[in-house]
Amino acid sequence: MKKSLLLDADVVIDLHSLGLFEKMRKAYDLHLTSKVFEEADHYWKGNVKIPINIRQKVCYNRRR
Protein backbone atom coordinates (compact mmCIF):
# COMPACT_ATOMS: atom_id res chain seq x y z
CA MET A 1 0.00 0.00 0.00
CA LYS A 2 1.36 3.40 -1.01
CA LYS A 3 1.67 6.24 1.47
CA SER A 4 -0.52 9.28 0.85
CA LEU A 5 0.74 12.82 0.39
CA LEU A 6 -1.30 16.03 0.45
CA LEU A 7 0.46 18.50 -1.82
CA ASP A 8 0.41 22.28 -2.00
CA ALA A 9 0.34 24.11 -5.34
CA ASP A 10 3.98 25.21 -5.02
CA VAL A 11 5.08 21.60 -4.62
CA VAL A 12 3.04 20.45 -7.64
CA ILE A 13 4.53 23.23 -9.78
CA ASP A 14 8.08 22.54 -8.61
CA LEU A 15 7.76 18.79 -9.19
CA HIS A 16 6.60 19.45 -12.76
CA SER A 17 9.32 21.99 -13.50
CA LEU A 18 11.95 19.54 -12.21
CA GLY A 19 10.43 16.63 -14.16
CA LEU A 20 9.76 14.64 -10.97
CA PHE A 21 5.96 14.64 -10.78
CA GLU A 22 5.46 11.27 -12.48
CA LYS A 23 8.07 9.63 -10.26
CA MET A 24 6.27 10.93 -7.15
CA ARG A 25 2.89 9.88 -8.55
CA LYS A 26 4.11 6.32 -9.00
CA ALA A 27 5.62 6.17 -5.51
CA TYR A 28 2.76 7.82 -3.55
CA ASP A 29 -0.99 8.37 -3.62
CA LEU A 30 -1.10 12.10 -4.25
CA HIS A 31 -4.01 14.15 -2.94
CA LEU A 32 -4.86 17.75 -3.82
CA THR A 33 -7.57 20.16 -2.82
CA SER A 34 -9.69 21.85 -5.48
CA LYS A 35 -7.89 25.13 -4.74
CA VAL A 36 -4.55 23.53 -5.61
CA PHE A 37 -5.95 22.49 -9.01
CA GLU A 38 -6.86 26.14 -9.65
CA GLU A 39 -3.47 27.45 -8.56
CA ALA A 40 -1.22 24.78 -10.10
CA ASP A 41 -2.43 25.01 -13.68
CA HIS A 42 0.90 25.89 -15.31
CA TYR A 43 4.61 26.51 -14.81
CA TRP A 44 7.18 28.51 -16.73
CA LYS A 45 10.13 27.03 -18.58
CA GLY A 46 12.14 29.99 -19.75
CA ASN A 47 9.58 32.22 -21.45
CA VAL A 48 7.23 29.35 -22.29
CA LYS A 49 4.08 28.72 -20.26
CA ILE A 50 3.67 24.94 -19.80
CA PRO A 51 0.16 23.77 -18.82
CA ILE A 52 -0.30 21.27 -15.98
CA ASN A 53 -3.15 18.80 -16.44
CA ILE A 54 -3.19 16.30 -13.59
CA ARG A 55 -6.88 15.84 -12.80
CA GLN A 56 -6.81 12.19 -13.95
CA LYS A 57 -3.55 11.41 -12.15
CA VAL A 58 -4.28 12.34 -8.51
CA CYS A 59 -7.05 12.23 -5.94
CA TYR A 60 -8.79 15.47 -5.16
CA ASN A 61 -11.35 16.78 -2.75
CA ARG A 62 -14.19 18.54 -4.55
CA ARG A 63 -16.23 21.05 -2.62
CA ARG A 64 -19.93 20.67 -3.07
Image (cartoon, grey):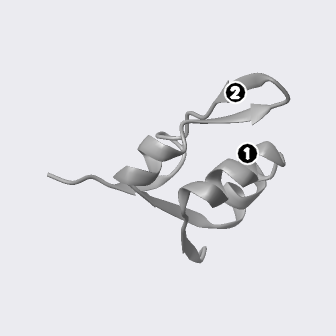
- Taking the image as shown, residue 50 lies to the left or right of residue 56, namely right
Instruction: Count neighbours of disc 1 (C-alpha within 10 A) and say few if under 14, some if 14 to 19, many if 20 or more.
Output: some
Q: Looking at the image, which is closer to me, 55 or 50?
A: 50
Where is the N terminus found, in terms of image quarters? bottom right
Residue extending furthest toward the front: 47
Residue 8: percent from the left, percent from the top? 54, 63
The residue located at (59%, 77%) in the rendering is 3
The residue that disc 1 covers is 16
The residue that disc 2 covers is 50
Q: Contact (CB < 8 A) between labels 2 and 1?
A: yes
Residue 59 appears in the rendering: yes
Identify the mark nearer the N-term, 2 or 1: 1
Q: Looking at the rendering, which quadrant does residue 44 occupy?
A: top right
Residue 18: percent from the left, percent from the top? 84, 49
Q: How far apart are marks 2 and 1 (CA)?
A: 9 Å
Q: SS class of the residue under badge 2? A: strand
- Taking the image as shown, residue 4 lies to the left or right of residue 44, namely left
Residue 21 appears in the rendering: no
Q: Is residue 19 above or below residue 31?
A: above
Q: Looking at the image, which is closer to me, 49 or 1?
A: 49
Q: Looking at the rendering, which quadrant does residue 49 occupy?
A: top right
Q: SS class of the residue under badge 1? A: helix
- Taking the image as shown, residue 60 lies to the left or right of residue 25, namely left
The residue located at (55%, 33%) in the rendering is 53
Residue 45: percent from the left, percent from the top? 81, 32
Q: Is residue 62 above or below residue 4?
A: above
Q: Is residue 31 above or below residue 12?
A: below
Amino acid at circle 2: Ile
Q: Looking at the rendering, which quadrant does residue 26 occupy?
A: bottom right
Amino acid at circle 1: His
Residue 62: percent from the left, percent from the top? 27, 52
The residue located at (21%, 54%) in the rendering is 63
